[in-house]
Image (cartoon, coloured by chain):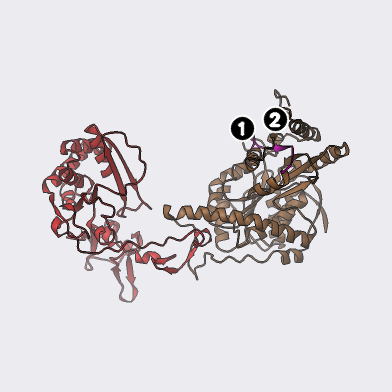
Chain colours: A brown, B red
Amino acid sequence: MKKVITGDHAVAIGAKLCRVEVVPAYPITPQTLIIEHISDFVYDGELDARFLTMESEHSVMSAAAAAEAAGARVFTATSSQGLAFMHEMLYATAPLRLPVVMVNASRTLGGPPGIWCEYNDSMGARDSGWLQVYVEDNQEALDMVIQSYRIAEDKRVLLPVMPCIDGFVLTHTVEPVEVPEQRDVDSFLPAYDPDIVLDPARPAMIGTFMPAEYIMEMRRQTVEAFESAKKVIKEITALFARSFGRDYGGLIDTYHMEDAEIALVTMGTVTSTARQVVDELRQEGKKAGLVKLRFFRPFPSEELREVLSGIKAVGVADRSISYHDGGPAFNEIRSSLYGMNIPVIDHLAGIGGRDVTEGQIRKMFEITQRAAEGEKVKIINWHNTRGETV
Amino acid sequence: MAAQTLAEAAVIEGNYAVAFPFFGAERRGAPVLAFTRIDSKKIYSKTQVYAPDCVVVLDDSLLDTIDVVAGLKPEGTVVINSKEEPDDIDLGVSVRTAAVDATSVALEILKAPITNTAILGAFAKTTGIVRLDSLEDAIGTRFGEKLGKKTGERNALAARTAFERTVTGRSRGVKKLEPKKQWLPTYQELPAGGALIEGKTEAGLIGPGSFIENKVMGWATFRPLRDKEKCTMCLLCWFYCPEGTIVRISDRGDLMTNYDYCKGCGVCANECPVDAIKMLRARV
């Protein structure tokens, strides 16, 4: 059934279709609509779940981890300062292999306080052990909630997943979304069936104190789960495409990369706008291609090396800054391409929620093209920033 | 604290010294390790000590469970808090050994079974690595600054008393100590997320309830003795015992203490409103 809904509404419907059992929540703009919709579903009897209004995001993630350890399928959502506040508990969830799914409505992390889209909230959590996927439209937001549970709960993975949806650009924007049928989701997503849960009838220990004799093996095991996740994500993407007819490509998605000479790597909604710019460039006879960096964790190094092999120059659109040598996506991509002798150019844009226009994306391609032609260009480019020239 | 004070004494004598602890969950009485390195020049090594010149044992009940001389150099020395003569102590190897009843020294002088200053006196006498007077200065600084001049002086006296009472000899090398078995799974063997249900390995039980194998009576300096005549069965001791070692025998309306797991903290005696519980020396 087609519905014209916001990204937040799409996410809430996704959680409902997954028959989530426990939803601990604390409201924060621009995530608020997600939990309001879920609260309505529970109140109206459309969703049989425990909705827990917590006193803080730290408690939200504590409750989420605990409920998951007790064997429940858990959903929650947060944003920005809320994600920062639960930072400690993010680290408790992943290595204990508790497959919580939490949507992050991407929003700048103060100070200075702001509410618009930027990735510096979720980038701060990139080493917490959560898988992260960035989506470009409301359909993908809904579909990724469903796929996230299937990936997270796979016995080869057992890691929490954080789908990131652009604050306001998706959360508060309506567009048509195909809502899957409940029976189709039920057959795609089996019931959560963990091996060990906290059950008084069968005592278990989860998350107890561990001395140095065990923690390196715990970390190594989690790295192995990340490696497995790469394979599982590809399988689940293919399975979802077969079941629902929408193929998201896997860890990355590509657009006009077959014969591309230059490429731009984008995340989230910038991808959507950039598709249009690539169409225009192609009409002008320019061999431009687009790589959508969907999963930031696990990071698709092998896939990027494969798809970018033979490319003359690569631009990276970064929607956050790490205060050292450009943005996080740029740094990870440059590391991934080490030894391939491809110029990698960083394009900082849209930070703090500043609108990323077609014009800016064109400029990113232009600079990347000049690098491809051997011109010495700036490596780190601040787009549409007063005092900077690009 | 003993390791740090020893390091300070060495520094007072113009040497360089490093001291550091290694412990697990913080529980008073639980076995801990501490290391001191002393040299005439700057020490760069930041690792634990695996081949010590001297091993100091503050609790001789450890001799039954831990191979305290593991790694000790053949010409090395062992200093033990023990009522026994050094020649009667069986360490599994015959090495130079000194013994002093540091617990009694501490109880006499400090009125508490805290033996770290007393044992340092024994260390100074046996090894000669630091002099007694620099040790007393170091104790004065480290204990005095935090706990007051009087406490510093009393601790220095504990060190001096132990220094005088220390007897040196050679340990016996008869018993065979099995290396301690430990469950050390590979990362592939470790269950996902380290989640454990009740289980058994070659190294013993793992998972919930496995601490039943971890008897802690050796930690205790004191143990509680309840006077049944005075006891009113108010159950405050049962309620407050942090280890759950006081068991209600409901059919007899009585209490029983499981000494296997009592670490002698004395909370029960402190809480008892009718003074029915006395703390007595566990090993004499």
Which image quarter holds the C terminus of chain B?
Answer: bottom left
Disc 2/disc 1 C-alpha distance (Å): 11 Å
Q: Residue B90 appears in which quarter of the rendering?
A: bottom left
* Callout 1: SS: loop
Decide which of B54, A49 is in the foreground and name it: B54
The earlier-in-sequence mark between 2 and 1 is 1
Q: Is A2 on the left-hand or right-hand side of B87?
A: right
Q: Hey, what amino acid is under mark 2? A: Asn
Q: Are marks 2 and 1 in contact (CB under 8 Å)?
A: no
Chain under callout 1: A
Give residue A274's position: percent from left, percent from top.
79, 40
Which residue is painted at 14% across and 45% down in the image?
A: B163
Is residue B156 at all visible to an observer of this figure? yes
Which residue is painted at 21% across and 68% down in the image?
A: B229
Disc 1 target residue: A325
Badge 2 crowding class, 10 Å Cα cut-off, few under 14, some 14 to 19, many 20 or more, is many
Q: Is A233 on the left-hand or right-hand side of A95?
A: right
Q: Which residues are magenta?
A: A309-327
Disc 2 target residue: A381
Q: Is A135 on the left-hand or right-hand side of B217?
A: right
Q: Hey, what amino acid is under mark 1? A: Asp
Q: Residue B91 appears in which quarter of the rendering?
A: bottom left
Give residue B246's position: percent from left, percent from top.
32, 66
Which image quarter holds the N terminus of chain B?
Answer: top left
